[in-house]
Amino acid sequence: MKTFHLEIAAPDGLRYDGDAVQLSVRGTEGELAILFGHIPLVTALKAGECRVYVGDAVRRAKYSGGILTVTKETVRMLSAEFRWLE
């Protein structure tokens, strides 16, 4: 599958900076799955669990809400609190 560049940041630093196959998060209007080629988008995020699909692995994390920006070049997730569950 095709990948996209993903950056996840919290106030205390960058939590992820690399390629991903999919990002699943909870937007204010419902669940979102971001894949390669997604249309440009800016949306607020509700607190919840996100899933980052990297190859055959899935990394899960808890976050406190925030903002998601999708451009042709990069997907950026900013959250006040973010912690990996593994």
Image (spheres, helix red, strand yellow):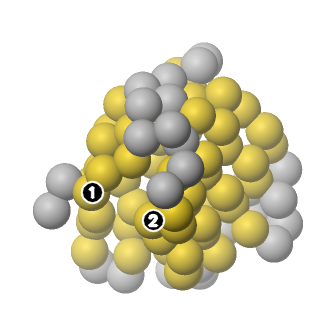
Taking the image as shown, residue 74 lies to the left or right of residue 5, namely right
For the residues labelled 2 and 1, say whether their Cβ atoms are less than 8 Å apart. Answer: yes
Q: Quadrant of residue 27?
A: top right
For the C terminus, the quadrant is bottom left
* On screen, residue 3 above or below 60: below
Q: Which residue is mark 2?
A: 15
Q: Nearer the viewer, residue 39 or 86?
A: 86
Residue 10 % position (x, y)? 52, 51
Q: Secondary structure at mark 2?
A: strand
Binning the other alpha carbons within 10 Å of mark 1 as few (below 14), some (14 to 19) or many (20 upward) gives few
* On screen, residue 12 above or below 24: below
- Whether residue 34 is visible here, answered yes or no, is no
Q: Which residue is mark 1?
A: 84
Tell me the CA gap for discs 2 and 1. Answer: 9 Å
Where residue 7 is drawn, which disc sits there? none
N-terminal-most mark, 2 or 1: 2
Tell me the residue at 30%/51% (across/down): 83
Q: Amino acid at mark 2?
A: Arg
Residue 77 % position (x, y)? 60, 51
Tell me the residue at 42%/31% (across/down): 64
Taking the image as shown, residue 39 lies to the left or right of residue 32, namely right
Q: Nearer the viewer, residue 6 or 78?
A: 78
Tell me the residue at 48%/70% (across/down): 16
Residue 35 % position (x, y)? 60, 60
Q: Amino acid at mark 1?
A: Trp
- Whether residue 53 is visible here, answered yes or no, is yes
